[in-house]
Amino acid sequence: MEPIIDTELATRRKLRAMANPAPGADFLLNRAAEDLADRVATVARRFPRAATLFSHGDAAAQALLSTGKVDEVEQIAAHAALAGSSGSRLAAAETVPLEPASLDLIVSLMALHEVNDLPGLLVQARRALKPDGLFLAAFPGVGTLAELRASLLGAETEITGGASPRILPFADVRDAGALLQRAGFALPVADIETVTVRYESMFALMRDLRAMGATNPLLARIRKPTGRALFLRAAELYAERFSDPDGRVRASFSTIWLSGWAPDASQQKPLRPGSAKVSLAKALGDLADE
């Protein structure tokens, strides 16, 4: 698979963001952590051993422990500074250094969108789960930063006559769900939630993205400095197309949630075609008679 993301650059930008934290810039990660705690709390079972995959800081681990359903959390991180205070293990990007069938739960928050070989990572996660173990992940999906993408594209096309890749190509929720099936997970579920955040200007949004370590990590990114004129024009287009009456601009953030289970004989399975005891025609006829 041809890589499109510079994973080393993505890690360096996360490290820079953690070294210079901006209050409130981690709102997406915190929101995902709260949702993770809610989702785990609704599952009617315990998960003695869990791991987080490349989920920066303590948010994911603390969310799991807060449910009272997880006893032990190991954090897998690409760099020691990106791991939280719980027990951690360093791993190369897109590598899951976990023993086969060793965990009851694996989660990943706001990381899978920066993976080149997502199918391969999902397969590794599924193999590390015990039978009937659960995988949960949240990451940005299609629609995220659509306004910024359109404004930068419009400005660059207008000024230079061309366009360069400046924002990640985010996954579609249906494609993400299909990847779970491809990786061998049972009972796969994918859903998406979009929130709109308002900013003073496009530049305020870009400051937040920098504070998240979420600026352009694409290998095909333009390497020479971008002129100020392009960003000024992009900000004008952003304000013209995506502002509210009070002058603040909107930014969309869509989060895809994936859940799947390591296969186990105890799980529900669809009936074999042709095994129904009552025909559809008879069932519909019975309803019509009522």
Image (spheres, rainbow, N blue to C red):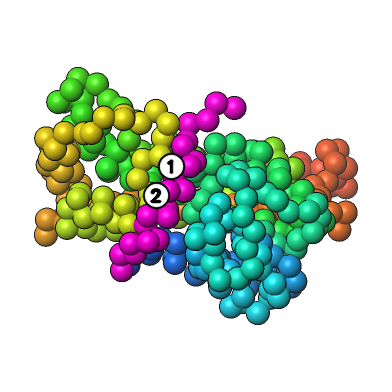
Looking at the rendered structure, which numbered label has been put on residue 140? none
Within 10 Å of the Cα at label 1, are there few (<14), some (14-19), or many (20+) other Cα atoms? some
What secondary structure is found at the residue carrying circle 2?
Answer: helix
* Span colored in magenta: 1-23
Quadrant location of the N terminus? top right
Task: Give the residue at x 31% y 68%.
Answer: 23
Q: Is residue 211 visible?
A: yes
Q: Is residue 18 left or right of residue 126?
A: left
Task: Give the residue at x 45% y 62%.
Answer: 29
Residue 3 lies within the magenta run? yes
Q: Nearer the viewer, residue 15 or 71?
A: 15
Q: Amino acid at mark 2?
A: Arg
Task: Give the residue at x 11% y 35%.
Answer: 229
Q: Is residue 194 left or right of residue 269?
A: left
Residues at circles 1 and 2 in contact by the CB criterion of under 8 Å: yes
Residue 13 lies within the magenta run? yes
Looking at the rendered structure, which numbered label has been put on residue 13? 2
